[in-house]
Amino acid sequence: MTGLPLVSVPRNRPRLWLALLSAGLAAACVASLLFGAGSTGPGASLRGLLAWIAGLDAGPDDARARFVVESLRAPRTLIGVLVGAALGAAGALLQAVTRNPLAEPGLLGVSAGSALAVAIAIALGASAATLRVPVAQLGALAGCVAVLAASRVRGVGDDPIRLVLAGAVLSGLLGSLTSMILLFDERTADEIRFWVVGSLAGRRPADIMALLPGLGVALAIVVVIARPLAALALGERVATGLGHRPRTVRLLVIVAVALLVGSATAIAGPIAFVGLVAPFAARLLAGPDIRRTLWLSLPIGALLTVGADIASRLLVRPSELPLGVLTALVGAPVLVAVVRLRRLPGL
Amino acid sequence: MWRIAARGHDGRWSILVDKRATAANLLLTGLLLAASLASLCLGSASIGATAALRGLFGHGDAMTVFVIRELRLTRLAAGLLSGAAFALAGCLMQTLARNRLATPGIIGIDNGATAFAVASVVGTGFGLAPPAMALAGAATATAITFGLAGGVGTRGYRFIVAGIGVGAAFGAGTQLMLARAPIDNANTAYPWTVGSLNAADPLAVELLAVGLPAALVGAGLLARALAAVRFSDAVARGLGIRVGRCRLHALALAVLLSALAVAVAGPVGLIALMGPEIARHLSSRRGVPLFGAALAGALIMVVADLVGRRVLAPIEIPAGLITSVVGAPFLLWILLRPGHRIGA
Amino acid sequence: MLITIRKTGLCLALTALLAVSLPGAARTLDTRYGTIEIDGTPERVVTLHEGALDAAVALGTTPVAAVATRGGDGVARYMDGRVDDIAIVGTARETHIEAVVAQRPDVILAAATLPESQYRLLSNIAPTVVPKGSNFAPDAWQAHTRLYARALNATDRAEALINNFDTRTAAIATQVPEAAEATLARWMPQGPLVMADIIFASRVLAAAGFTVNDAGVVAEGRPHSDPLSLENLDRIDSDWLFLATLNADGENALAQARSSPGFERLDVVQRDRVVAVDGQLWTSASGPIAANAILDDIAAALDLDRQP
């Protein structure tokens, strides 16, 4: 125990970082409950929060604050945590399986695939509320398969940036197809156009419940897959030698990524760059081992999303900014920074 | 190669004409004329080719003349000019960066121009007209992309991805403005985000009509130097070319052309990739196919606009969506072809 | 049927001669892009604005073509049955000028917001009537209706329509309690857009005796606010809430709103004074027929409210 852990980056202490980040996330969640676009300030919110947690029955002002905290801010905070953690984990998994530090569900077209699937479903007359999650997951799955197929092309797999480029093109193509659907169906255009910029506002607790099965399965896969994936990072032969089956591992990772991204996209719309920034930060803190970065990506992704959501509420009160735009404005510089590194961080 | 030689009273002169490039340019010109004629003839009410041509020169009944000259010709001009400008800008940028993927649309320049232009359309306080704003945006994005790429050079994929990052940030800015604008204004600005000739601003078309010929002349003057720069700085210097100045001029031309074209048609960026690529396939690999690229770009734009107008009439599909749906698979094919090199 | 357009002062003698032999004397219209002259009663009328279509039909003309309502692919639902065979020559977003040419119009009635570049093209096809002044000015629809009426040679009918509206609003206003506040909002999934107090439907509400409350969140000169944060729903808690969507029928809008947290807590919801209305009518249309249709909605809401 030498030196100050906060000053020198102790790459070998993932547990410490995990604890610190979780504490930070908890603080962000409290802040997310206390601050909003409305007139309920931090002080009133705190009383409302206490009233909710302690079950105290207070005056009408506190009842209002309690409502704002309990019914408006708590659901979106929870969704922010889930979406951010899901995207962070999806990014870490996708980067590990493609061995590419730039692989990000948004950049590679996985989110665009799920947005297109939802747009098609709504345009065909599906009820947005019930069908969205499985449809988005199917779209994400198609996007994942396309990405993996591209990364298997000779020459592309070894060149991380070429894959990203192909993904960006695929993303653009899927986005154009979504725009075309909006063009035909002006009636759904309003609904989808607001959805494609990404937001956490106005979601109901029932919407969260719809996500849980997918996220649960994905979590189970992640727990099983972490060790084989780390072995795979050492090369296919090593992994096979250790008794893992690379094809099965890849297949499982793809299913997990599709479930995670599909769930996140279904509830919040496409939110770019969280899946890039979270694993990137995790690697800075804990080094390249996937078993560490994966777990660290969860709180970092959540922290990022909740933080961006707080900012989206405070910047243009009494209205709100679209969340996806804010994460893109934060994430794009990180992308450029990663690209500028002389050597891309190894995986 | 053909050698055209003549003997004047003050001596002999001769120029070399690339046979294949000439044939390619003639082919493209022929196709372009056919597409233009189709674009004049087809519309809400079809007009026969003869009547259309007579109308073009002011003959025939007044309404036909009006439809041909005021409506279809204006739109055709916007398509020809913007398509040629996009492709020429793409060809210049590819050559100076020595990178086949380094087209203005991909490295964020179009997005920069669009973001600034949309800012002026939705009225966020900037007072300049859209073309001027587009130019400012294109210059800003170029400066940022090249500034950020300073450490990595322009040849590889890193440069491109840095540009994608810049483009993503500007794209997010555009989204933000559209989400905050009144819905009616946002609808006015919507064609800007996908690229369409329907809302072409007459002022912007006029500016482009002046800018494109000037840029073509400028590009023609740079052609020889660019053909040398294509290989390496050392080769170019050996041939007595001032490499830095040549690059700077080409970059300035590319930025100007992209901005003027975006002001007319919005971000139809993939033309900048497809135009030069087609021209390169048709012509020989000796030179930089600046004129061929311009012709091919104009052809793509006119055809995309025609298809977008006709295929599902009366719904109009913006030309930008058509080029994106056709161009993106093409781009993927370039990217994913095993064992290719991206150096121009 | 003959219509001529002339720059003022040109061919006055000829026009006067023709006027003798035609129903409807030559009229000089003062429009946004200068004065135009119209002669006789136009037969083929093309309207490029929802308010112009509404006014033309109210004035007894059946236009041959119009633009689609916002968010739809035909004319607005409240016009159903009045103009069934009408051709659509564009959307609120853009006009297909070639399609206008194909209609061979005698006169084109356009919106006050028509850009000059479009005007220059359209005025080649037929006299194009572009009202002066903003759509958001007080009494804008009355002024615009009067102008369109002069173009259509139906000035008397316009005055009758406007008088009728004034009488009707005065009658309704007696049933509205003093200083009753009303808010008009368009429902979006992430929060309501509050409509400004300067748009057409708000003016009708005001004429019917309501104080229109736009919650102070609409920027100057804008038709509506950004989507209001759900935390701020109490800002639209007026005595009455008129709730519209373009996408679906009004009941659907209400169901959507009810499912969002916070809505049920509003006083106006508790007192059952939320009125689901058609967004095409309330947030996009204008003109005499729309004004009366909105008054119908208001009167029905007041009746319902008075029943126990």
Image: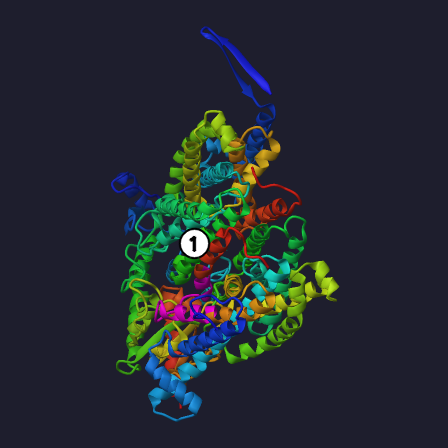
Q: Tell me if mark 1 has few (under 14), some (14-19) or many (20+) residues whose alpha carbon lies within 10 angstroms of its own.
A: many
Residue A202 visible to the viewer? no
Residue A341 visible to the viewer? yes
> In x, y percent, where is residue B252?
41, 38
Tag 1 subunit: B
Residue receiving disc 1: B170
Decide: is A129 above or below C17.
below
Q: Main secondary structure of the magenta part?
A: helix
Q: Between residue B268 and residue A331, name the one nearer to us.
A: A331
Query: Quadrant of residue A53 in the image?
Result: bottom left
Element assignment for label 1: helix
> In x, y percent, where is residue B271?
53, 42
Residue that sits furthest to the top in the current view:
B9
Q: Between residue A283 and residue C200, name the one nearer to us.
A: A283
Decide: is B127 above or below A284.
above
Quarter of the figure with the N terminus of chain B:
top right
Quarter of the figure with the C terminus of chain B:
top right
Q: Amino acid at mark 1?
A: Phe
The residue segment tinted magenta is: A304-328
> Does A318 appear in magenta?
yes
> In x, y percent, where is residue C235?
34, 77
Q: Is residue B15 left or right of residue A27?
A: right
> Does C270 appear in magenta?
no
Q: Between residue C222 and residue A163, name the one nearer to us.
A: A163
Query: Quadrant of residue B202 in the image?
Result: top left
Instruction: Give the residue displayed 26% in from the left and 40% down from the top.
Output: C12
